[in-house]
Image (spheres, rainbow, N blue to C red):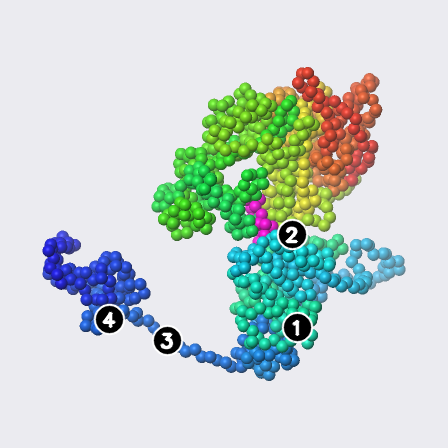
């Protein structure tokens, strides 16, 4: 105890002061030295007090509970005390200062005396040995012990096995037998026939497709046939640097490790099979369907894939396929195996000893392996230690065999319906086209970062973070996001989630594209967020304008980081999980200090992908520096831009732009203006734009648009196999009953409805293929329109229809449309089908294309690729075929108005747009040439087309229905019609030089060898003569039958050249008779 030179004042809660006169040290050696310093206060009349703060500063942990208090220093308990119920204070017990060797206090815990009892009863020894041998059948194990095949196992003999047979669940599960199928028929028995049948006297021959009992015997003995399978890439390589295991099973199974896939291809050459069964590793093709049926307890030859723990030395791999040989069943394959003399980590000899003398598959009649569980079985494993080497859990759907035509019709739809109880995992929405190379399936970043290409995806993810933030290595940051603490997020703001979108873009500099997007559904943006962007019709119109403008060319470009860097008036916030941030980024930005649990928060200060306002503010910002350079958006067409003085126009779709230019200086001026703010990548060939692949031929003035690979990726996404036979029709077709007095409507669909997963699958398929149909393959539109009316409440019949549609898509994967130079005048062919859809609905369609304008309305225009094909079901129930046709002209006219405006804003003036229809009543109503009586009951909205005809915008023309290109899209047709007419709408270089419409036209107007029209003796004969010189070869030829010639007035004229004309063909002329 030492006196203080200056007394220390201590304030009481009532305001009074007390003074400490001396300083001392507590005699408690257990406490740290810094916590033992105390003051002596003479005025303190109560019990001594101890401060909590010095204890905590010294590293102690002070815990207060309702009845007690403790002081710990790490795991040691220093002081304990209790709480006084009268005054509510905690009193600590002081240890005895006279104790010679003070020791830490021990917590009073409940204890129990336990001993280890080594029970070596015979029953336990037998059960342990039986389980260590993978629970074989007791009879098999008894025979092996009796014959001396297994020796040296403690406690395991034939006698002890008989006396103490173990009861093992694994043995029972490994020897389950299913009831053989086809024993109890579900078909009702036909009533007995009590009268004679004439067939008994003159029996008819069996139809070729009926199932009979005629059998024959044949032998087949495959030799040299092998099965192979490949494990996925392990998370961590083995100690020898291997990442894969190739397993090959023939007479004797074998396995081989490999460090990469290139090494696997070399290994595949070592196992050269004699039979034509290919190795999956060597060919990268899916194996033949060979797995065992679900629930059948037997091992499949095709899938003996062993599981392996991490970091296992690959030198221990050979015994994996040989473990079942521990219990041999024949003297030729057996040899004394003493398991007690082999160390626990020893490797068994591979293909040596007794195993080498038996070249046949050594599989007992009943395997001792644990049976696979079917998908409907509970996923809880009863056995506490399942063998990972011989079991493999299968998830997802298995390939089913095709349904033969001779099978009974009672199973026509049951197998097409997925059972809701089966845990089949469906693919989610397609957020890109990033496929996992190890699985062949679309995957998200979490899976892609762990695949064989994971290093590329991780590097791209780090670059994306640096691009959004303040940079990373060579990537320059845009200051879009800033890492902040959680308490810096304003109270009125919600931190949204992060979504990583991955896509494989081979046209980009970095094909592995990773984009960070913010969850826009949680962002509250009160202003208008709509963005003006060009649609597919505007893009197709711009392509046609490029072909039809003398000397014009097309190029496409991409504005890098278009959404990033645009200033925002109000910041947004987002939280990111730690696992999505690479370690390099984490260290560079010192994020450990900002980490809140497992999340890091960012402040979004500039435009970013996913924000609802990002597109609007980016588009507005683009306009602020393009307008001073002379580039302005057109007044009425969204996404279309033109220059005030230069002959240049371009369309803008998000950050992709397609430019039509005549002079190189003009496009250089545009690129220089854009590069003042953005990093711009130019494709001078113009081969890729808006997901379309463009093939330009400026000499012939043609352009082919296609989307190669789109259908294949979609079929892979929906796991749809290639049909065994080509499917030529996208939908089913009901043959009409010609001559019937009464036509009945089809019965309502009463098939079972699909579950929620089936509904979502149908909707995803319709959405994915609808874009493709509108962009390229228009032959899919009628089928998709019918299916879309059922997608809200689909049934098994809908599933059958979607399966047929997918077969059609798989049979016709890559469609192509060819455009040629024309006079850039809009032409429309309109048609409608009356009562062709359920619930008394009708369908209309149109074929919008660009061609030359003719002075004679009766002269058909030269064909061209369609820029728009509306194909929809009328919402109204019309009362006649004329009203349906009038409704079709009304809707086609409405669709044509923005196209006419777009053409005029591109510099192509439009006269009256001809609309071709095959209904004379509709033509008369639209042209005011018929006396209205009953037609007044028609929907008054359809008379809108009559007013537009009066204004000179449209000209309604009648033409025979067989020549109407829109007829194909208004109804369902037989497969023969689809096959014959497909080349009339899509370009195929392998087709002949004739098509359906040309055959029909040539039959109506026979051609002659004259190169000029003879004098017309009648008006009809004059029309026929004029038609002979404008009817071209079909679009599918691509040889420029109408050759553009540029004369002195810089206008395109088209001259006819000799082409082969098809002869009269009843099949081609009247394919509708096949209906």
**Residue at 61% in and 28% down:** 554
Residue 343 image position (x, y, % from top left): 54, 72
Task: Judge the density around disc 3: few (<14), some (14-19), many (≥20) Cα neighbours within 10 Å.
Answer: few
* Precedes in sequence: disc 4 or disc 1: 4
Mark 3 to mark 2: distance in Å? 62 Å
Badge 4: residue crowd in 10 Å (few <14, some 14–19, many ≥20): few
| For residue 384, side relative to residue 206 (left or right) | left
Quick one: label 4 or label 3, which is nearer the N terminus? Answer: 4
In the rendered image, the vertical position of residue 53 relative to residue 67, given as above or below:
above
Say which of marks 1 and 3 sits in front. Answer: 1
Question: Mark 3 sits on what residue?
Answer: 112
**In the picture, which quadrant includes the C terminus?**
top right
To which residue does mark 1 refer? Answer: 354
Stretch in magenta: 424-440
Which residue is identified by label 4?
102
Structural distance between the alpha carbons of marks 4 and 2: 74 Å
What residue do we see at 63% from left, 80% from top?
A: 148
Q: How far apart are marks 2 and 1 (CA)?
A: 35 Å
Label 4 to label 1: alpha-carbon separation: 70 Å
Vertical comparison of 826 with 294: above or below? above
Q: What element carries label 4?
A: loop
Q: Which of marks 2 and 1 is nearer the N terminus?
A: 2
Q: Is mark 2 on a helix, strand or loop?
A: loop
Sequence-wise first label, 1 or 3: 3
Task: Identify the residue at horizontal 13%, vertical 52% (top origin).
Answer: 15
Query: Do we see residue 72 in this rendering?
Result: yes
Residue at 63% from the left image edge and 50% from the top image edge = 719
Q: Which of marks 2 and 1 is in front?
A: 1
Q: Mark 2 points at which residue?
A: 284
Residue 570 has which mark?
none
- Quadrant (top left/top right/bottom left/bottom right) for the N terminus: bottom left
């Amino acid at each position: 105890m030492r006196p203080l030179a200056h007394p220390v004042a201590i304030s009481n809660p009532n305001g009074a002061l007390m003074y400490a006169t001396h300083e001392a040290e507590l005699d408690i050696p257990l406490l740290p030295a810094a916590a033992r310093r105390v003051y002596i206060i003479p005025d303190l009349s109560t019990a001594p007090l101890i401060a909590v703060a010095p204890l905590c500063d010294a590293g102690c942990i002070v815990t207060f509970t309702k009845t007690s208090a403790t002081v710990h220093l790490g795991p040691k308990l220093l002081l304990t005390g209790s709480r006084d119920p009268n005054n509510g204070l905690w009193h600590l017990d002081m240890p005895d200062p006279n104790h010679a060797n003070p020791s830490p206090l021990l917590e009073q815990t409940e204890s129990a005396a336990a001993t280890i009892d080594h029970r070596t009863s015979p029953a336990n020894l037998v059960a342990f040995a039986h389980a260590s041998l993978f629970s074989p059948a007791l009879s098999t194990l008894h025979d092996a012990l009796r014959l001396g095949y297994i020796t040296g196992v403690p406690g395991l003999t034939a006698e002890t096995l008989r006396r103490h047979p173990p009861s093992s669940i694994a043995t029972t599960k490994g020897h389950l037998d299913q009831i053989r199928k086809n024993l109890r028929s579900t078909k009702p028995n036909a009533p007995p026939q009590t009268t004679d049948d004439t067939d008994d006297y003159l029996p008819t021959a069996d139809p070729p497709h009926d199932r009979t009992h005629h059998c024959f015997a044949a032998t087949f003995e495959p030799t040299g046939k092998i099965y192979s399978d490949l494990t996925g890439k392990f998370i961590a390589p083995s100690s020898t640097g291997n990442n894969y295991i190739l397993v090959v099973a023939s007479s004797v199974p074998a396995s081989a490790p490999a460090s990469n896939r290139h090494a696997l291809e070399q290994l595949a050459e070592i196992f050269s099979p004699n039979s034509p069964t290919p190795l999956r590793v060597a060919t990268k093709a899916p194996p033949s369907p060979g797995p065992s049926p679900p629930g059948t307890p037997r091992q499949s030859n095709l899938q003996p894939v062993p599981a392996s723990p991490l970091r296992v030395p690959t030198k221990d791999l050979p015994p994996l396929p040989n473990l079942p040989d521990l219990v041999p069943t024949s003297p030729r394959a057996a040899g004394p195996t003493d398991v007690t003399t082999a160390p626990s980590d020893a490797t068994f000899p591979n293909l040596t000893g007794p195993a080498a003398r038996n070249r046949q598959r050594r599989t007992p009649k009943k395997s001792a392996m644990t049976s696979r569980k079917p998908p409907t079985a509970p996923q809880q494993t009863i056995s506490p230690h399942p063998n990972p080497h011989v079991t493999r859990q299968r998830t997802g759907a298995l390939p089913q065999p095709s349904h033969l035509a001779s099978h009974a019709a009672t199973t026509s739809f049951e197998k097409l319906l997925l059972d809701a109880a089966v845990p089949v995992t469906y693919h989610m929405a397609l957020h890109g086209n990033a496929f996992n190379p190890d699985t062949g399936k679309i995957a998200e970043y979490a899976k892609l970062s762990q695949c064989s290409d994971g290093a590329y995806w991780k590097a791209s993810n780090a670059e994306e973070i640096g691009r959004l933030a303040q940079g990373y290595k060579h990537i320059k940051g845009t200051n879009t996001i800033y890492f902040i603490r959680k308490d810096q997020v304003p109270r009125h703001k919600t931190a949204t989630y992060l979504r990583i979108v991955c896509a494989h873009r081979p046209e980009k500099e970095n094909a592995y594209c990773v984009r960070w997007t913010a969850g826009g559904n949680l962002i509250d943006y009160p202003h208008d967020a709509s963005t003006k962007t060009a649609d597919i019709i505007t893009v197709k119109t711009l392509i046609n304008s490029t072909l039809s403008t003398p000397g014009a060319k097309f190029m496409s470009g991409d504005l890098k980081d278009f959404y990033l860097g645009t200033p925002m008036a109000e910041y947004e916030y987002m939280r990111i999980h730690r696992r999505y941030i690479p370690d390099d980024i984490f260290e560079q930005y010192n994020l450990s200090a900002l980490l809140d649990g497992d999340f890091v928060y960012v402040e979004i200060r500039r435009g970013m992908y996913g924000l609802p306002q990002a597109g609007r503010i980016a588009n507005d910002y683009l306009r602020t520096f393009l307008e001073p350079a002379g580039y302005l958006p057109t007044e009425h067409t969204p996404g279309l831009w033109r220059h005030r003085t230069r002959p240049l126009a371009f369309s803008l779709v998000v950050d992709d732009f397609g430019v039509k230019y005549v002079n190189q200086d003009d496009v250089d001026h545009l690129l220089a203006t854009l590069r003042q703010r953005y990093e711009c990548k130019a494709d001078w060939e113009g081969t890729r734009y808006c997901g379309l692949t463009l093939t330009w031929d400026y000499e012939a003035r043609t352009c082919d648009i296609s989307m190669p690979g789109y259908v294949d990726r979609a079929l892979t996404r929906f796991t749809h196999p290639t049909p065994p036979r080509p499917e030529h029709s996208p939908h089913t077709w009901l043959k009409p009953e010609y001559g019937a007095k009464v036509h009945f409507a089809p019965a309502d669909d009463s098939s079972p409805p699909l579950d929620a997963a089936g509904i979502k699958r149908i909707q995803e398929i319709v959405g994915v293929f609808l874009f493709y149909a509108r962009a390229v393959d228009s032959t899919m539109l009628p089928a998709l329109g019918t299916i879309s009316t059922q997608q809200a409440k689909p049934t098994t019949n809908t599933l059958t229809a979607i399966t047929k549609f997918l077969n059609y898509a798989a049979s016709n994967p890559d469609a192509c449309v060819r455009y040629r130079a024309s006079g850039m005048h809009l032409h429309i062919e309109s048609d409608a089908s009356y009562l062709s859809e359920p619930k008394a609905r009708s369908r209309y369609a149109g074929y919008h294309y660009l061609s030359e304008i003719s002075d004679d309305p009766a002269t058909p225009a030269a064909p061209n690729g369609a820029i728009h094909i509306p194909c929809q079901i009328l919402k109204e129930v019309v009362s006649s075929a004329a009203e349906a046709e009038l409704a079709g002209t009304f809707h086609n006219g409405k669709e044509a108005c923005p196209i006419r405006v777009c053409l005029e804003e591109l510099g192509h003036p439009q006269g009256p747009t001809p609309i071709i229809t095959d209904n004379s009543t509709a033509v008369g109503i639209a042209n005011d040439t018929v006396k209205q009586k009953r037609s007044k009951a028609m929907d008054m909205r359809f008379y809108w087309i009559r007013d537009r005809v009066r204004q000179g915008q449209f000209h309604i023309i009648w033409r025979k229905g067989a020549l109407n290109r829109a007829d194909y899209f208004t109804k369902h047709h037989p497969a023969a019609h689809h096959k014959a007419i497909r080349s009339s709408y899509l370009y195929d270089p392998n087709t002949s030089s004739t098509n359906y419409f040309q055959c029909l036209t040539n039959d109506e107007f026979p051609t002659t060898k004259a190169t000029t029209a003879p004098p017309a003796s009648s008006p009809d004969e004059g029309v026929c003569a004029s038609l002979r010189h404008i009817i071209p070869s079909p679009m599918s030829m691509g040889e420029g039958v109408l050759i553009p010639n540029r004369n002195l007035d810089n206008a395109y004229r088209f001259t006819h050249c000799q082409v082969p004309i098809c002869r009269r063909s009843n099949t081609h002329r009247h394919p509708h008779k096949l209906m």
